Amino acid sequence: MVTATPRRISGSGTRQIWRAGLLALAVMVAGCTATPANRQVSLTTEDAESQSQMQPAALREHARILASYGGVYENPKVQAEIEKTVARLVAASEKPNLKYQITLLNSPAINAFALPNGHLYISRGLIALANDKAELASVLAHEMGHVIARHAQIREEQARQTAIIGHLVNDVLSDPQTGALALAKSKLTLASFSRAQEFEADGIGVGISARAGFDAFGASRFLTDMQRNADLKSNGGPVETHGADFLATHPATPERVKNALLNARQYTGPGSGERDHNEYLADLDGMVYGEDPSEGFARGRRFVHPKLGFTFMAPPDFTLDNTAQAVLGLKDGGGEALRLDVVSVPAEQGLGDYLKSGWMENVDSASVDQFTVNGFPAATATAKGDRWAFRLFAVRYGSDVYRFIFAAKTMTDAADRSFRDSVSSFRRMSLKESAAIHPLRIKIITARAGDTPETMARQMASADHKLQHFLVLNGLTTHDRLKPGEKLKLVVE
């Protein structure tokens, strides 16, 4: 779930990150991160001492989060709205003396989470997907629910117990079947408990939001839109999550929607709480949408990085995703994929030698070939895995080396040629080109008589699925009709 420019990563972790990248493109699971929210003020001396002990670790985790999520997004209007909403929620919560530190993350990922010390994080991607103050409040209250229920401490104790059982299995039990069963049961207990935490936090959050005067159905609406957004990102089809859901740390979104609806009905009827749709959207007008300008842009098949001054075109029928680790691409149907990242390679090491240096297994040394790409030194080689065949490229651009890793379940001549053509499109951008590229932004417009979702969608800067993107972004369905005077979100350049 995710954003950013290609990052330097260690060679030893390349194979694991590549597999994770393929999985991330294939399965988009909506939901909050399993890290419970944090607080700055405690109720007991014991809690204060515990927070003091956690501070160095929390500071390190805070720095890691900022690095992974594009740093802080500076937007005074949105920041003020979040802080005002949190203040209302805290006053209506079971622990009104707790205080929260809030960081708005510069990431298009749809996420909200918090550290065990109470530092709450929310991404601008989530802010953009929400359509009113009640939906925003539902997310913030959910994270507060984790804190109030002390899920961080409970999860830590569960993890310790699992580690103890694992140690017992490895070092004490002689029967491998008994040992495996004990370890499997411990993992299932931990996963089930985590799922129960999410349901509990949902329930606490809906109650807090309703008592604070917000529409209690904001949670069910937002969870529904998260699932629709995930489906859209998976090329418009439903995401298959049954295989991963058994030991998932979060419940499947349909389960959470049903649970949120049941909780909301205990407090109020639909439409009886505050939503403030128009006021909420007014704060979003002009907000950056999608990748940050400093992190490069994936626009359909084309990737551009004005700051670093390069661009390339993915093979036909590929969709690109600019993640925190690399630029990832997947072909429609899933039979081919790509990864672009950047590493440091000593200037004295030839690119052919680098491809054979062991960062990728099973490289065919005889396939290594050196050439140039639009004036830049380059090398290529092939490699084979159990289920995938790989075409590797290394291109030296300035002081760094850009690695293109193309994978195909069946490496045909046509596929290999399309991979070579993609790398051949890698080139330096002119200063004029770089200056002409602007980030996408949210623009708030007012519907007029005769406007339809179809006419509005034509104004969207999205490369694909314009109508579906417009509907999801505005919490609308294909059956909804626009009302004159209604405020709507567009994505514009």
Image (spheres, grey):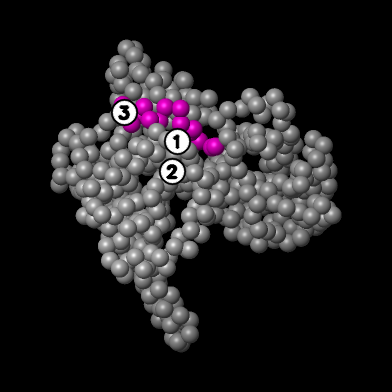
Q: Nearer the viewer, residue 77 or 36?
A: 77
Counting other residues with Cα less than 10 Å from the Cα at mark 2, is it few (<14), some (14-19), or many (20 or more)?
A: many
Magenta region: 278-292
User: Which quarter of the figure has residue 442?
Assistant: top left
Tag 3 or tag 2, which sits nearer the N-term? 2
Counting other residues with Cα less than 10 Å from the Cα at mark 3, is it few (<14), some (14-19), or many (20 or more)?
A: few
Are circles 2 and 1 on residues that touch, CB within 8 Å? yes
Left or right: 386 with respect to 24?
A: right
Residue at image position (15%, 38%) is 269
> Three-letter amino acid code at disc 3?
Glu
> Three-letter amino acid code at disc 1?
Asn
Q: Position of residue 161 (x, y in %)?
A: 38, 75
Give the spatial CA distance, label 2 vs label 3: 19 Å
Residue at image position (58%, 28%) is 438
At mark 1, the secondary structure is loop
> Three-letter amino acid code at disc 2?
Leu
Residue at image position (76%, 51%) is 381
Residue holding disc 3: 279
Q: Which mark is residue 104?
A: 2
Give the spatial CA distance, label 2 vs label 1: 8 Å
Residue 291: in magenta span: yes
User: Is residue 364 visible to us here?
Assistant: no
User: Which quarter of the figure has residue 175?
Assistant: bottom left
Q: Position of residue 422 (x, y in %)?
A: 70, 37
Q: Which mark is residue 75?
A: 1
Q: Nearer the viewer, residue 17 or 206?
A: 206
Q: Position of residue 58 (x, y in %)?
A: 45, 60
Residue 333: in magenta span: no
Residue at image position (48%, 38%) is 74
